[in-house]
Amino acid sequence: MNPVIPAVPLNNGVEIPQLGFGTYKLPPAQTRDLVLHAFDAGYRHVDTAQMYRNEREVGEAVAASGLPRAEVFVTTKLNNGFHRHDDALAAFDRSLDALGTDYVDLFLIHWPLPAVGLYTEAWAALEEIYASGRARAIGVSNFQPAHLDRVLESGTVVPAVNQVEVHPYLRQDEVRAYGAARGIVTEAWSPLGRGTVLTDPVIANVAARHGVSTAQVVLRWHLQRGDVVFPKSATPERIVQNADLWRFELGAEDVAALDALDRGERTGSHPDLENDTTR
Ligand code: A2P
């Protein structure tokens, strides 16, 4: 039986399924079939990006699924080289073309690139796209509070989400609290720490007591914190397992045990330092 995945309301009333399927590093040649497998397993939310070079295959899967477009939530992200206003608009058009759709559900600025210094210009372009109705919601990714301060000062639309790296080794309390205070939903990328947290003995202990896998414990921890997650897997059985999160609940002690694992450990770039406009 397919899971009933809860919806999280965004600040403009649009609802996002709390669990999605991540496509970072999925090889384009496998992406279509894996996304179709995820739809079969009950996922209705797919997270891609211009940077991942698999938007076309994601779009093919949406089309091949036979699902009504309105039943699938599709997120994509502006690539780093396109923060100039006109470049952002053109890049968005290319995303729609690749995805084979006339709107996306959520469009994000992928990285703030503070050394480039154009993210408020990019945000103005996203506001235009939003006003045109071709993105049902807009947001940012990898923004620190200081970057969000500038977006809120210069813009007129409050970002719907901030998608940042979050997992038990990187709790991100400060940026999550900043978002919560301003109606910005946190999306946790690399919710499994790209696999690094899955052999942790504390998590293994919790998993054994609940009779589930360590991945399921970690995903459940994210859900109970209220974040949106979209684990990536290229393994069909894991795609199914990662959506099987609704028949157990972590107790306060379990949550505290996972909370205590925070050690500020990133698997990806620090947002203040990322400045690569070529990828
Ligand atoms: P694979 O794609 O080979 O199945 P994140 O979402 O944090 O980036 O983590 C993705 C990594 O975690 C991938 O290496 C993926 O491996 C692995 N992974 C995803 N789901 C599971 C699972 N249920 N059990 C073990 N490893 C998993």
Image (spheres, rainbow, N blue to C red):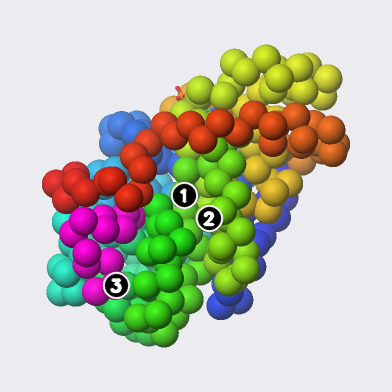
Compared to 184, does 234 lie above or below? above
Q: Residue under circle 2? A: 175
Left or right: 81, with 72 as reference point:
left
Nearer the observer, 47 or 71:
47
Q: Is residue 119 magenta?
A: yes
For the C terminus, the image quarter is top left
Nearer the observer, 240 or 211:
211
Label 3 is placed on what type of residue?
Thr
Residues in magenta? 110-121
Q: Residue under circle 1? A: 164
Residue at x 47%, y 53% (from the top left corner): 163
Residue 127 horizontal/vertical position (percent): 35, 79
Left or right: 37, with 64 as reference point:
right
Circles 2 and 1: CB atoms closer than 8 Å: yes
Q: Residue under circle 3? A: 120
Nearer the observer, 197 or 181:
181
Label 1 is placed on what type of residue?
Val
Per the model, the C-alpha gap separating discs 1 and 3 is 18 Å
Numbered disc 1: secondary structure:
strand
